[in-house]
Image (tube, rainbow, N blue to C red):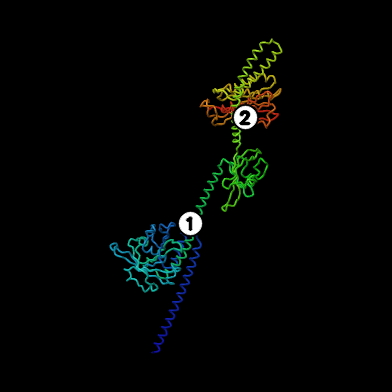
Amino acid sequence: MSLCEGKNEWLQDLLGLLRVNDKREGLVERTVTDLRSLYRSARRMGRSDEVMVLMDYLVEDIVSCTELERVLVLKLDEQGRNLETQVFYGFKEVGKRPFSVDFQQVNGLLRKVYTEQEPLNVVGFSDLPEADQTVPRTCGILRDDYRGSGNRQNRRQRVNLCVPDFASEDVELKKYSRFRHFSVMDLDAHDKTVKFLMGDVSSFLILPICDNNDFYGYVLADKAFTNQPVSYEEIRLSSAIASHSALAIGRALKQKSMLRKIARQLAEIEYLKSFYESIIQNLRSGLITVDQFMKITDVNKAAEIILGYKREEMLSKPLDDFLSPMDGKKCLFLDAADEMDNTMGHLSEVPMKKKSGDLFPSEVCFSVITDSSDTVTGLSCIFRDITAKKVLEQDLARVDKLASLGEMAAGMAHEIKNPLAGISGAMQILARNFDQGDTNQLIFNEVQSQVKRLDNFINSLLQFAKPGQSQFSEVDLIAIVKKALFLSAPRIDDKEIKVIESYESDAPIVQGDDGQLQQVFLNIVLNAIDSMGKDGVLTIRSYLDKESGTIRSRNECMSPSCRSMNGYFKVAVQDTGSGIDPDSMEMIFNPFHTTKGNGTGLGLSISHRILEQHGGTIIVESEPEVGSNFIVCLPVCRP
């Protein structure tokens, strides 16, 4: 061997070593570059929670790290039904075709990627001509042995290689020495998805966008302009970017879904809140809620109206401030706590206090308020003003009492009146036997007077027991009042009582029985005269109180045109007498109740009964030692 030959071999060996070192240095440098790219991509994916932004980042990172020339992202909708195009890169305007297809109809290579959830690199692929569609087509699927194929956790780190049978002669399989033969797949000639999106391409890459639980879509990429297959290194790097991007996309989708769910639940809660608040606020009964310390936490509008307080004035106040138990006890609801039914609550009648200080009877239902663990957190107090109910109960009790008394009075009057008539006749015959001025004649006259008085009482009793049939017609109420004053004039003059009259200039139409109404006003005027001494003042005035409604008359003889009213025509008879004791106010309309020495106690009872038949009523206002005011209210007929 010559010196030159030896020198050449040494140079060749040295050049070989340099090439190996350069190759190793290039591999290390490329690896470092890829790691930096992955790091930057992972950091970008953490900056946004918008799905479209993350998909744009995915495409940008793949393009910046590889030589891929076209990239397309397909996204599966949230219902998992349709596959839609989302991001285009490298496509001409005519190639950016919006695409949406039923995901159940997607088959072929895309279905293979969805099933395996591993990247698939298609090499040497092209559609058959239309005339050859009946020719069987197969694709040899070669699988990368990277990190072993048996490890389930390494899925999506392997790469599949699809080599169509008719293109295998044109493919240099030695370039893919890392792949081993895995299976043969039939290609569906009817799968037009890839051709529609990518056009006539020879080689392309399909990447799944998925995590361990969900599948979100695909990345389709190729080198259509240079018509080159995708390299193994580009597949590995693009797959790694798609893998960690899928985690960010999945997180964003779950967050978006959670936010929508929260928004939907908040809307439902808001609706339910508004719904129940509307029910509570529009209750006709008052509602008060209290906490464990019996401090008021909420009230509804009815409670404000009934009690006369504003909501702000009641909050944080003790519930005891608005209750006034009749026995003087405090904490009425605590006394009844042992008897309280958690389902139905505790019902009782308790006087309550208004802001004005007035007491009114109320029906109160106390119920417990519990949380999700059945722990008592407070009480609810639902109440209503039962003043009208109490008045109605009193009226019903009085009616029942009057009915019983009426039956008894009718029987007694019938049994007394006949013998009384005989006694009166006999006394008149016996009186003829005595001369005028005889002492016995005076005695007989006195007896006759007492018999007549007794007969008048019996007639009043019969009138109370069985009032006569009313004859309704249009009446002049002012004229009736003036007639009652005329009949009372002698007694008014005897006591030198001053009469003040003030009448409505245009009195409305009132229907009623002239004789019965005259009896009512005569009774009231005579009572007023009897209650006053000398120099008293009797004031009579009339006025219209406009209040619409339906007349609740027991008398069917009232004209149908007068069944609906246009307010009340009121006549007030006010005196300056001794007034009525508050303890007697509830009994003044009871039969036989009287404060007069020679009264029967039937005048006001009969008057009240007559006014009830007329669909009206009588109101009494009185103050001891000041006087009384009797207000007769009769409904006004509509024109």
- Assign a secondary structure to mark 2: strand
Q: Which residue is mark 1?
A: 257
Quadrant of the rendered image containing residue 133? bottom left
The amino acid type, in three-letter code, at marker 2 is: Ile
Tell which of 133 and 399 is nearer to you. Answer: 399
In the displayed orientation, state which residue is furthest to the left: 131
Position of 230 relative to 402 (above/below): below
Position of 177 relative to 452 (above/below): below
Tell which of 173 and 560 is nearer to you. Answer: 560
Residue 174's spot in the image, x, y percent?
Answer: 36, 74
Quadrant of the rendered image containing residue 350? top right
Residue 476's spot in the image, x, y percent?
Answer: 57, 22
Dot 2 surroundings within 10 Å: few (below 14), some, or many (20 or more)?
Answer: few
In the displayed orientation, state which residue is furthest to the top: 435
Position of 256 relative to 286 (above/below): below
- C-alpha span from label 2 to label 1: 69 Å
Taking 267 as reference, is 129 left or right?
A: left
Q: Nearer the viewer, mark 2 or mark 1?
A: 2
Q: Is residue 639 visible?
A: no
- Assign a secondary structure to mark 1: helix
Indicate which disc residue 619 carries.
Answer: 2
Position of 578 relative to 15 (above/below): above
The amino acid type, in three-letter code, at marker 1 is: Ser
Taking 208 as reference, is 339 left or right?
A: right
Quadrant of the frame with the N terminus? bottom left
Residue 193's spot in the image, x, y percent?
Answer: 36, 60
Residue 370's spot in the image, x, y percent?
Answer: 58, 50
Dot 1 surroundings within 10 Å: few (below 14), some, or many (20 or more)?
Answer: few
Q: Is residue 515 visible?
A: yes
Q: Earlier in the sequence, mark 2 or mark 1?
A: 1
Marks 2 & 1, CB-CB < 8 Å contact: no
